[in-house]
Image: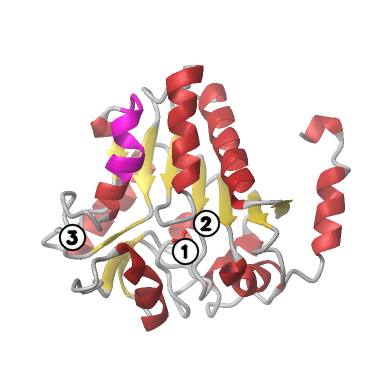
Amino acid sequence: MEIIIQPSSQEVCSLAARIVAKLVREKPAAVIGLPTGGTPRPMYAELVRMHQTEQLDFSRVTTFNLDEYVGLGPDHPCSYHYYMTENFFNHVNIPEKQTHVPDGLAEDVPDFCRHYESAIREAGGIDLQILGIGEDGHIGFNEPTSSLASRTRIKTLTQKTVDANKRFFKSDEIVPRHVITLGVGTIMEAKRCLLIACGQGKAVAVAAMVEGPVTAMTPASALQFHPSVVLLVDEAAAGRLALGDYYRSVYRNKPDWQR
Ligand code: PGA
């Protein structure tokens, strides 16, 4: 795992956007796994800016989103589909048919999940899976005790995650407890993973993911077994890493050919 510590969340997101842009320039038909949530918003804003001012071309890219609330359709302002439309899809030249977000209104959820997995396989697999991390160590919405071999399926959110996500909902709205999420096993099949985390609230989960044991209690720790992971964190999220100075020195002293 490559651990890159940046001074602020803005720098985390602009470096994440540069990594995505490099992939899209090198492989115009790349398949990218996308996250939602508060953390990646500035990354999407930067990618939109690169599209508008630097001709970054998304016309051949295919995307698969990580998760969605069960019961919320694309028009619901708190759905992840809506988030993607507002923050990214509406502002770049990606054809709608090449974007995929789990269907929160699917009538047959297990059947939908099987189709989602097949669509990823038919697209050739995910080249770069971008991830956030929950304060409880989840990736996607794979909450603690999720099987590390799990596939796309329905999950029930922990109270901690429901509380963390309340900020995106109106005060009188109920946060859905059920979600569809890519499984940990599905995420592990991506060719590369890029996990971004910002803020002190993520520091314990980040340390558990990188330096703790691999355990279903911290689903993100499964990434220790993935051959190609970049973890991009700000100083606050890196605050509990025991080997923080080592990771900073590795990054400072990278051979030129690795940059
Ligand atoms: P956040 O969510 O970016 O809103 O903190 C990350 C996550 O829960 O995976």
User: Label for residue 67?
Assistant: none
Work out whether mark 1 precedes mark 3 in sequence or the reverse, and give the earlier one. 3
Decide whether the magenta segment is chiefly helix, strand or loop.
Answer: helix
Mark 1 surroundings within 10 Å by alpha-carbon count, few (fewer than 14), some (14 through 19), many (20 or more):
many
Please name whichever residue, 40 or 256, is drawn nearer the observer in this view of the structure.
40
Seen at 85% across and 60% down, the residue is 245
The span picked out in magenta is 84-94
According to the picture, the residue beneath numbered tag 1 turns out to be 184
Instruction: Decide which of 181, 197 is in the foreground and name it.
Output: 197
Determine the residue positioned at 23% across, 66% down.
Answer: 170
The response on whether ligand 1 sits within 8 Å of label 3 is no
What's the residue at 33%, 30% (across, down)?
A: 91
Look at discs 3 and 2 and give the one toward the viewer.
3
For disc 3, the marked residue is 72
Q: Which residue is mark 2?
A: 188
- Mark 1 or 3: the one toward you: 3
Q: Is residue 12 above or below residue 69?
A: above
Q: Earlier in the sequence, mark 3 or mark 2?
A: 3
What residue is shown at x 18% (from left), y 60% (from top)? Answer: 72
CA separation, marks 2 and 1? 6 Å
Vertically, is 43 above or below 187?
Answer: above
Q: Is residue 230 above or below residue 90?
A: below
